[in-house]
Image (cartoon, grey):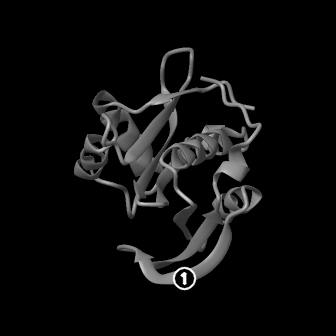
């Protein structure tokens, strides 16, 4: 299990998150404005978003992040990313667990996400949590024109019961 600590993503995290975003998703990286927009909906009593960063205790370097948006009783995993040197440490599962906890807190009955068809590592993570493929979005990831698998998890609370995260 990873030693990175999760905490709420704040505006000052956008620049280091963008560096990681550009390294991991060079063709279809999110923009600064996209992160700003989602973070604007992540605070206060009317919050509909939950964004977290994973930070190394030594040095405070951000090595992962994730975000979830909710609308009514449906949530959508907007993004999950883990620095390459932390692949295989369980950090992606820690971030996903936190996002599913947020979906449960938002009282969402199901969680949706899109995953690149060529990202088998991520697909296996989502399947371990109970997500099932329900369709495709042709050419979803641009400009590379890569298809996305649409996945769904019913009752996210069942996937996070009894799990623990550090942080």
Q: In which quarter of the image is the N terminus?
A: top right
Q: Is the residue 78 above or below the residue 134 in the image? A: above
Q: Position of residue 80 (x, y in %)?
A: 52, 50
Q: Is the residue 164 above or below the residue 20 in the image? A: above
Q: Which of 140 and 106 is in front in this view?
A: 106
Q: In this view, does 80 lie to the left or right of 97?
A: left
Q: How many marks on residues? A: 1
Q: Quadrant of the C terminus?
A: top right
Q: Position of residue 2 (x, y in %)?
A: 69, 30
Q: Is residue 22 left or right of residue 39?
A: right
Mark 1, residues whose alpha carbon is within 10 Å: few (<14), some, or many (≥20)? some
- The furthest residue to the bottom: 138
Q: Which of 100 and 8 is in front in this view?
A: 100
Q: Where is residue 129 in the image (x, y as percent from the top left)?
A: 72, 55
Q: Residue at x 43, y 42 (%)?
A: 50
Dividing the picture into quarters, in which one does residue 119 lie?
Answer: bottom right
- The furthest residue to the top: 58
Q: In this view, does 115 lie to the left or right of 13?
A: right
**Residue 82 can be seen, yes or no:** no
Q: Is the residue 13 above or below the residue 88 in the image? A: above
Dividing the picture into quarters, in which one does residue 128 lie?
Answer: bottom right
Q: Which residue is drawn at 52% across and 43% down?
A: 105
Q: What element carries label 1?
A: strand
Residue carrying label 1: 136
Q: Which residue is drawn at 34% across and 55% down?
A: 30
Q: Which residue is drawn at 26% across and 47% down?
A: 32
**Residue 152 can be seen, yes or no:** yes
């Amino acid at each position: 299990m990873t030693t990175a600590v999760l905490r709420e993503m704040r505006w000052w995290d956008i620049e280091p998150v963008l560096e990681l975003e550009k390294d991991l998703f060079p063709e279809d990286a999110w923009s600064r404005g996209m992160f700003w927009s989602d973070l604007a909906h992540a605070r206060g009593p009317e919050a509909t978003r939950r964004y977290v960063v994973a930070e190394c205790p030594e040095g405070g370097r951000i090595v992962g992040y994730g975000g979830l948006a909710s609308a009514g009783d449906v949530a959508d995993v907007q993004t999950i990313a883990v620095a390459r040197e932390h692949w295989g440490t369980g950090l992606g599962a820690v971030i996903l667990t936190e996002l599913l906890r947020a979906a449960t807190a938002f009282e969402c009955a199901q969680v949706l996400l899109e995953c690149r068809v060529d990202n088998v590592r991520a697909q296996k993570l989502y399947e371990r949590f109970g997500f099932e493929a329900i369709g495709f979005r042709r050419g979803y990831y641009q400009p590379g024109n890569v298809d996305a698998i649409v996945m769904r998890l019913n009752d996210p609370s069942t996937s996070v019961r009894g799990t623990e995260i550090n942080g």
